[in-house]
Amino acid sequence: MHFVKMHGLGNDFIVVDEFNAQSDRDYNKLAPMLCDRHFGIGADGIIIVLPSDIADARMRIVNADGSEAEMCGNGIRCFAKYVYESGIIKKQVLSVETLAGIMKPELFVEGDEVQKVKVDMGKPDFEPGAIPAFMPGTRIVERPLEVDSQPYAITSMSMGVPHTVIFVDDVDEVDIIGLGPKIEKHPIFPKKTNVNFVEVLNDHEIKVRTWERGAGATLACGTGSCASAVAAAITGRTGRAVTVHLIAGQLEIRWAEDDTVFMTGPAAKVFQGDIEF
Ligand SMILES: N[C@@H](CCC[C@H](N)C(=O)O)C(=O)O
């Protein structure tokens, strides 16, 4: 299998191109082996490039544990860079079909190289049924959740995928590996949740660390950065445009007045190869 290894701020993916010819590979079964960092290629997930009947192309994202995700923010920037630079779709604004709907990446190109990608990420959905989350009420904004007898104030929404945000004083002090999976798999989230720990630096900068559903602690999460920015704004901690500081760089997130969230950031190709299995 030929693949290209890409990343968005260190959130890394094995990109497989099936745009012109589709295989019968079972990526959900293959993902744990291919994504293994010791026995495989190593990645947080697999992105499959496919044709679409309703958009320019279709993106599938399979997490490292083999579960299928509806959408991936860092992944869609890599996807857009890949389809443009490989000549599959030579457009500066693309429409990409995902399980979370049609996303619209806009490419900033210099020469023939994509420098950064701005994505219309759609609107956050606070409706508990849409997340999904079992909690009474119309939305989950700073609501109490007890984990290991400790109270946390959670803000949850769907940003294409389920996200939960917890504000903390210092993200570097959080036991992400210990606490992340307990919230990810908490019984109030029937489809699990991604978990973002957010430190507010000032009214236009936040620091985010994410425990991802199906992938564990990652260096960056695009949809998580969007959810964190929306949560920071809706709770009055920041304005609607913030720089999100992640371990390997920054994303610019803007929650527009019409409710649409825009994410701007880089994508990078690292290497390509072939693997036999
Ligand atoms: N890394 C992603 C999110 C990928 C999907 C996630 N693990 C899930 O299952 O919801 C991003 O950049 O948004």
Image (cartoon, rainbow, N blue to C red):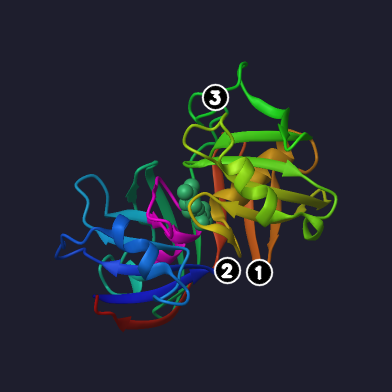
Q: Is residue 205 left or right of residue 102?
A: right
Pointer 1 residue: 249
Residue type indicated by callout 1: Gly
In the picture of the structure, the residue carrying the numbered disc 2 is 9
Instruction: Tell me which segment is drawn in magenta.
Output: 62-81
Please say whether residue 14 is visible from this viewpoint: no
In-image side of 242 versus 212 (left or right): right
Q: Residue at x 45, y 69 (%)?
A: 43
| Badge 2 residue CB within 8 Å of ligand 1 | no
Above or below residue 112? Residue 181 is above
Disc 2, SS: loop
- Between disc 2 and disc 1, whose residue precedes? 2
Q: Do labels 1 and 3 touch, CB within 8 Å?
A: no
Q: Kindly tell me whether mark 3's CB lies below 8 Å from ligand 1.
A: no
Relative to residue 268, is residue 146 drawn left or right?
right
Q: CA distance from mark 1 to mark 3?
A: 31 Å
Residue projecting furthest to the top? 137
Query: Residue 39: percent from the left, percent from the top?
Result: 41, 76
Residue for badge 3: 127
Q: Secondary structure at mark 1?
A: strand
Would residue 13 be seen by someone viewing this image from the given angle?
yes
Q: Earlier in the sequence, mark 1 or mark 3?
A: 3
* Residue 115: image tag: none
- The vertical placement of 223 against 80, above or below, is above
Q: Quadrant of residue 40?
A: bottom left
Labelled pair 2, 1 in contact (Cβ < 8 Å): yes
